[in-house]
């Protein structure tokens, strides 16, 4: 499998913080790698919403999670902040 890029665009606050980082990865998978619990299938030509969330593990370590969902065009309605309520590592 070739390396795939999923580009996300940081908020203004994150852009400011990133300006002090050297040119190296901002986040990386665990040293044991990433093993999906379920199949992850992204279909070519289909549009998805990718969102990054900051959080902490049960051990109190900082973590970043990326959610992948079907794209929903913006309608002006309020958004839900509960997308990560059930996240556990």
Image (cartoon, rainbow, N blue to C red):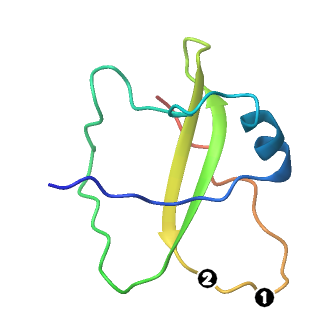
Q: In the rendered image of this protein, does residue 76 appear above or below residue 25?
A: below
The location of residue 71, given as percent across then percent down, is 55, 79
Q: Secondary structure at mark 2?
A: loop
Decide if residue 76 is in sight here.
yes
In the picture as drawn, the residue positioned furthest to the front comes out as 23
Q: Is residue 84 visible?
A: no
Q: At x 52% / y 55%, what residue is drawn? A: 67
Neighbourhood count class around disc 2 (C-alpha, 10 Å): few under 14, some 14–19, many 20 upward:
few
Res 31 → quadrant: top left
Residue at screen point 65% across, 31% down: 55
Q: Nearer the viewer, residue 27 or 30?
A: 27
* Marks 1 and 2, how far apart at CA: 8 Å
Q: Position of residue 19 (x, y in %)?
A: 76, 36
> CB under 8 Å between callouts 1 and 2?
yes
Could you classify mark 1 by the number of other residues whose Cα lies within 10 Å: few (under 14), some (14-19), or many (20 or more)?
A: few
- Measuring 55% from the left and 18% from the top, which residue is drawn there? 58
Measured as percent of width and height from the top left, residue 78 is found at: 84, 73
Above or below, 43 relative to 28: below
Q: Quadrant of residue 86?
A: top right
Q: Which mark is residue 62?
A: none
Q: In the image, 33: left or right of 54?
A: left
Residue 13 x/y as whole percent? 85, 44
Q: Quadrant of the N terminus?
A: bottom left
Residue extending farthest to the top is: 59
Residue 72 has which mark?
Answer: 2
To which residue does mark 1 refer?
A: 75
Element at badge 1? loop
Q: Nearer the viewer, residue 13 or 72?
A: 13
| Residue nearer the viewer, 80 or 34 | 34
Residue 57 quadrant: top right
């Amino acid at each position: 499998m070739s390396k795939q890029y999923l580009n996300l665009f940081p908020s203004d606050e994150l852009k400011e913080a990133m300006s002090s980082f050297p040119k190296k990865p901002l986040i990386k998978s665990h040293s044991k790698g990433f093993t999906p619990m379920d199949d992850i299938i992204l279909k070519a030509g289909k549009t998805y919403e990718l969102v990054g969330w900051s959080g902490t593990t049960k051990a109190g370590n900082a973590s970043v999670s990326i959610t992948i969902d079907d794209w929903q065009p913006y309608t002006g309605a309020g958004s839900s902040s509960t997308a990560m309520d059930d996240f556990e590592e």
